[in-house]
Image: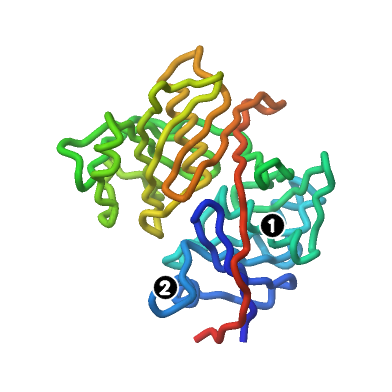
Amino acid sequence: MVAFTKGHGTGNDFVIIPDPDGELDLTAEQVAALCDRHFGIGADGVLRVVRSTAIDAGAAALAEEPDAEWFMDYRNADGSIAEMCGNGVRVFVHYLVRSGLATIEPGSTLPIGTRAGVRDVTASANGYQVDLGRWKLADGEPLAKARGLDVARPGLGIDVGNPHVVVALASEEELAGLDLSFIPELDPAPVSGANVEFVVPGEPLVRDGVGHVSMRVFERGVGETLSCGTGVAATALAVRHWAGERAPHNWQVEVPGGTLGVRMFPAEDGEHVALSGPAQLVYSGTIELA
């Protein structure tokens, strides 16, 4: 039997598996079974809580930040390995804090190892803020086809530790009319795939110095989710890019599961982007892995 906790961040839900000493070797099939919403617990992904010293991928995290005791081993719902998950990091940290495995004192930072590098997390008024690190524009502007769109639309590639393509739509009606039970097609298709975000600017776009947009997302290896933290950050970055130099550096992004905040700020190695929002733990139990 394996202990687990179910948690979510704005509806982006996860099965959290504590494995501090790295004793579990979860297969893709086991992860997919856990995430199956009909025959398993049901989730968008699995967060394995493991010490950085107990997983091979943790060596790079410790080399980057020796205090990164904990590593977020994140798997998509289909069992595939993903580099990062913005909502997942907040839920992961909330689990550590609630379980007594880590603390975040006021004004302090908790470093978390991920396959995209170390991510620093702080407590915020509405939950947690995670510094997603440097971001960059990806090469090219792929065309995105989606069920419900009359013609393909150009997208903007954004990398925030994992790949995204952000696509602007004309109205809330167009956004609501998308059928994301079908995988959006990208041309050219990214080698490793990408999450695809569809965004509509608020009316007005900027209120009291804060940008406002609405978004839906199709996550690679998962499908449509109620929220995607890195996708929210990529969306705000893309809209700021389109809006020009006078666009704000603070954004609120509405997703089906709630509202998340995005902040862009300068750092020694270039501009970083931070994501803030809630994290909740729903229930705990045990389950037998096949």
Q: Which residue is mark 1?
A: 94
Image coords of residue 194 (percent x, y):
40, 47
Image coords of residue 80 (percent x, y):
46, 63
Type of colouring? rainbow
**What kind of residue is marked 1?**
His
Residue 84 visible in rendering: no
Query: How packed is label 1: few (under 14 Cα within 10 Å), some, or many (20 or more)?
Result: many
Q: Is residue 133 above or below residue 116?
A: above
Task: Give the left or right position of residue 159, taking residue 171 as reference.
Answer: right
Determine which of the numbered discs, if any, sits on residue 207 in the image: none
Q: Is residue 230 above or below residue 289?
A: above
Residue at figure coordinates x 28%, y 48% from the top left: 184
Mark sitting earlier along the chain (2/1): 2
Image coords of residue 99 (percent x, y):
76, 66
Q: Residue furthest left?
A: 150
Query: How packed is label 2: few (under 14 Cα within 10 Å), some, or many (20 or more)?
Result: some
Kindly state the secondary structure of the residue where label 1 is placed: helix
Real-space Cα separation, disc 2 to disc 1, in angstroms? 23 Å
Q: Residue furthest top?
A: 246
Determine which of the numbered discs, if any, sits on residue 36 in the image: 2
Task: Give the left or right position of residue 51, taking residue 72 as reference.
Answer: right
In-front residue for pair 191/237: 237
Image coords of residue 158 (percent x, y):
45, 35
Task: Give the left or right position of residue 62, taking residue 281 as reference.
Answer: right
In-front residue for pair 48/35: 35
**What kind of residue is marked 2?**
Asp
Residue at figure coordinates x 23%, y 44% from the top left: 177
Residue at figure coordinates x 67%, y 63% from the top left: 56
Quadrant in which residue 93 is drawn: bottom right
